[in-house]
Image (spheres, grey):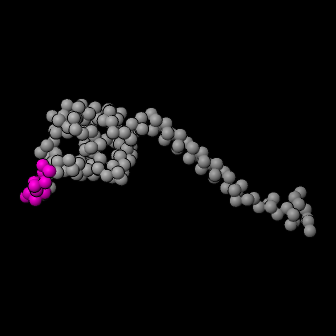
């Protein structure tokens, strides 16, 4: 059974012509989503390459020199007593696999955001989470030396290693 309605044939045979498939119906949104993902991936890839992102996956202290605000910190480390025994990751990332890469990922995100938007303090200051990582690293490497010292039991609260030994890792 067919009938004509303003030049269109309707009926059982042509029902699909009037009801597009879900893919066809959502095609503009799918194209827009694909374009958005493509542009985001392109910009992200370019930025990662331009910022020498792969260098941050290494243990090389020179990776820190990608950011100009780290020049003084790197120069201080290169003249410090720790240069012969420790690189940046030894002190500034946890010593377990998950903790290290989580810290690197979080710091990478925060650093890239801060440097892109200009929202960072110069000279650079360590944040509380990273200060905790640093403290644990000091205690990890120097456990035999400081195991008997109970700085945390002193009147007035927590005393960190760097409160007395501020210039050890990055020189004076």
Q: Is residue 6 visible?
A: no
- Give the residues drawn in magenta, as a range: 144-156
- In the rendered structure, the answer to whether residue 72 lies left or right of residue 117 reads left
- From this viewpoint, which residue is outermost toward the front? 144
Instruction: Identify the residue shown where x is 17% and y is 48%.
Output: 142
Q: Position of residue 52 (x, y in %)?
A: 41, 35
Instruction: Identify the residue shown where x is 23% and y is 31%.
Output: 78
Q: Is residue 93 visible?
A: yes
> In the rendered image of this protein, does residue 13 appear above or below residue 109?
below
Instruction: Identify the residue shown where x is 35% and y is 51%.
Output: 97
Location of the N terminus by quadrant is bottom right
Give whichever of 139, 24 is nearer the camera.
Answer: 139
Instruction: Identify the residue shown where x is 20% and y is 47%.
Output: 141
Residue 145: in magenta span: yes
Give whichever of 110, 28 is nearer the camera.
Answer: 110
- In the rendered structure, the answer to whether residue 138 lies left or right of residue 39 reads left
Location of the C terminus by quadrant is top left
Residue 94: in magenta span: no
Image quadrant of residue 125? top left
């Amino acid at each position: 059974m067919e009938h004509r309605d303003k030049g269109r044939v309707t009926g059982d045979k042509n029902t699909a012509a009037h009801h597009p498939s879900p893919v066809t119906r959502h095609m503009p949104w799918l194209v827009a989503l694909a374009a958005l993902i493509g542009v985001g991936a392109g910009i992200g890839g370019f930025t990662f390459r331009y910022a020498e992102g792969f260098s941050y996956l290494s243990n090389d202290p020179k990776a820190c020199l990608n950011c100009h605000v780290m020049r003084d910190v790197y120069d201080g480390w290169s003249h410090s007593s720790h240069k012969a025994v420790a690189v940046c990751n030894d002190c500034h990332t946890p010593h377990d696999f998950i903790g290290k890469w989580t810290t690197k990922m979080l710091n990478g995100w925060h650093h890239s955001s801060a440097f892109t938007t200009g929202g960072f303090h110069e000279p650079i200051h360590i944040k509380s989470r990273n200060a905790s990582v640093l403290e644990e690293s000091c205690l990890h490497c120097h456990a035999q030396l400081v195991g008997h010292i109970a700085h945390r039991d002193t009147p007035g609260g927590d005393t960190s290693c760097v409160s007395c030994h501020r210039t050890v890792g990055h020189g004076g």
